[in-house]
Amino acid sequence: MIDVKNVTYSYNRTPVLNGLNLHEAEPVITGLWGRNGAGKTTLMSLLAGHFKPNSGEIHVLGQDPYNNLNALENICYIQENHPFGQHWKMTDVLEFGRYFHKDWDQNLAEHLTDLFELPKKKKITKFSKGMRTAAQIILGLASNAKITILDEPTNGLDAVKRKQFYDALLTSYEDNPRYFLISTHHIEEIQPLCESLVVVHDGHILLQEQMDEIRGRGIILSGEVSSVEKATENERVLETVKMRSTVRVMIDEVFSPEWKTIATDQNLAIEQASLQDYLINLTTNKKGVQL
Ligand SMILES: Nc1ncnc2c1ncn2[C@@H]1O[C@H](COP(=O)(O)OP(=O)(O)OP(=O)(O)O)[C@@H](O)[C@H]1O
């Protein structure tokens, strides 16, 4: 579905993506995570054909998306602040969607407009932030595009609306499996929806894995310094927090019965790291924090 090979991209000679590779052959809901400025939006813009890579190749459904109307027929990219026309109302948004997306689902668009309680006759410029976001979501889901890219789609949505969006996304995906790439800073919340996760860091893909596998990663051990050191001496330590005579470390391992046994043997407390904390530690160097 998408194939990104060795792509580099710079803004005014400042490199942002640096030999980035990403491949996905099947329809899947993929979460895209990275720290601020990691390059998520740049990657999404390249996939949507908005930019041309400085070097490397991008193929979306077998075609180079840059300046390619044929390829763009199958791509729906909803930016964080999607540009709506100055005088647009919801009826214009739905009209726009119907015009630009050949697989547009008008019934779904109408249903979601009602579900999100969006007034049809009010100008989008007069919408609240959450209402604008909901309008963007409607464009993204009802497009039915084979490649649907959503940049921070839940920004400004309250908890009820976020749940409605997740349910609508899953139902729409079950009806019509396609490639969804969804960038987020709130990985804990969207991880149940995602079958895979891509992490961008330092201009390349740090991780591309099945969500089920990543969910199990990150173990936190705490106890006496010497016992923790013994248990973790051959491990990749992602974070160390010293508290007088005890220490708390996160290691890059899968939470397992074997590790529970090791912890019990060494008289250590053990817990599974949250996905968010694991990813933050994977992309920062927080070793040696002293409390
Ligand atoms: N139009 C631009 N001109 C110059 N530099 C830019 C431009 N857009 C982005 N950048 C820079 O490129 C880098 C990557 O930005 P990008 O928006 O792709 O990151 P991101 O992962 O989406 O970040 P965030 O999570 O903060 O939205 C940042 O250092 C940013 O300052």
Image (cartoon, rainbow, N blue to C red):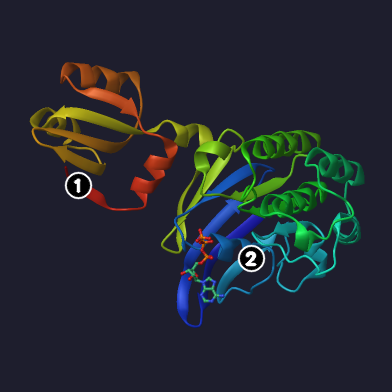
Which residue is found at the position 85% from the left and 64% from the top? 88
Is label 2 within 8 A of ligand 1 (CB to nearest ligand atom)? yes
Residue under label 1 = 289
Residue under the point 36% across and 52% down: 283
Please say if 234 is above or below 50.
above
**Of residues 50 and 5, which is closer to you in this image?**
50
**Mark 1 or mark 2: which is in front?**
1
Q: Is residue 162 above or below residue 95?
A: above
Residue 69's spot in the image, x, y percent? Answer: 81, 69
Quick one: label 1, few (<14), some, or many (20+) residues within 10 Å? few
52 left or right of 246 in image: right
Q: Position of residue 165 (x, y in %)?
A: 70, 39
Q: Nearer the viewer, residue 151 or 14?
A: 151
Disc assigned to residue 66: none
Residue at position x 89%, y 60% in the image: 92
Question: So how many labels did they put on this image?
Answer: 2
Locate residue 187, reporting x and y percent.
51, 42
Look at the picture and state if 16 lies above or below 281. below
Q: Of the two numbered discs 1 and 2 on the same chain, state the one appearing first in sequence.
A: 2
Q: As shown in the figure, which amino acid type bears the numbered disc 2?
A: Ser
At a point 16% along the width and 36% down the height, the residue shown is 233
Question: Residue 103's spot in the image, x, y percent?
Answer: 87, 50
Under mark 1, the amino acid is Val
Q: Secondary structure at mark 2?
A: helix
Q: Which residue is mark 2?
A: 45
Q: Are marks 1 and 2 in contact (CB under 8 Å)?
A: no
**SS at badge 1:** strand
Q: Quadrant of residue 50?
A: bottom right
Quadrant where the C terminus lies? top left
What is the crowding at mark 2: few (fewer than 14 residues within 10 Å), some, or many (at least 20)?
Answer: some
